[in-house]
Image (cartoon, rainbow, N blue to C red):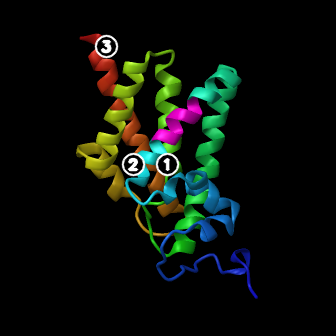
Amino acid sequence: MSTISDLPVDYVAPPMRPTAAFMLRHPAHAIAFGFGSGLSPKAPGTVGSLWGWASWLLIQNSLSLNAQAALILVSLAMGWWACTLTARNMGVSDPGAIVWDEIVAMWLILFLIMPAGFMAQLAAFFLFRFFDAVKPGPVAWADRLFKGFGWRGGWGILFDDLVAAFCTLLVLALWRWF
């Protein structure tokens, strides 16, 4: 019996639905699925974003600012690997169940706006969900830029959410300025 690591690098599985069993087959799948938050039958991106928000509230109290920044950078690199491998193994270039991109984007937003009150955090959450779901202007551009499988496609899964995070931060900064 072959394992996932025995498959050729350019192998793409036939399209499949996300399941808990699939998630538990490989650590990359668990990471990409946000440790189960991406298995939500409705709005997995929103559930992943909520998981990112909730987990950040714990992270920020446990780690120094430098450690928080390092965690985000390591999570981006680890997420790139996990999203690339999981998308390939699912046979879908950007599956909705992959929510690590939403989680890390929420971490980045909250890292940059904290300390912020609940209403500012809520505004950040809703703005991010708007930019991620509707994909206006630059987010749509970012979503189209890196498509497919492999490392390019894996980066594309993360990149449009990073652009949505930037748009969220820009709107929040303009709101504070005015």
The region drawn magenta spans 50-56
Who comes first in sequence, dot 1 or dot 2?
1
Q: Position of residue 166 (x, y in %)?
A: 38, 34
Q: As shown in the figure, which amino acid type bears the numbered disc 3?
A: Arg
Q: Which residue is mark 3?
A: 176
Task: Report if the CB atoms under discs 1 and 2 are less than 8 Å apart.
Answer: yes
Give the CA separation, mark 1 to mark 3.
Answer: 26 Å
User: Is residue 128 shown above or below 90?
Assistant: above
Q: As shown in the figure, which amino acid type bears the numbered disc 1?
A: Asp
Q: As shown in the figure, which amino acid type bears the numbered disc 2?
A: Asp
Q: Position of residue 46 (x, y in %)?
A: 40, 46
**Residue 86 picture quarter:** bottom right
Which quarter of the rendered picture does the C terminus lie within? top left
Q: Which residue is mark 2?
A: 160
Q: Which numbered disc, 2 or 3, marks the residue closer to the eye? A: 3
Question: Mark 1: which secondary structure?
Answer: helix
Give the CA separation, mark 2 to mark 3.
Answer: 24 Å
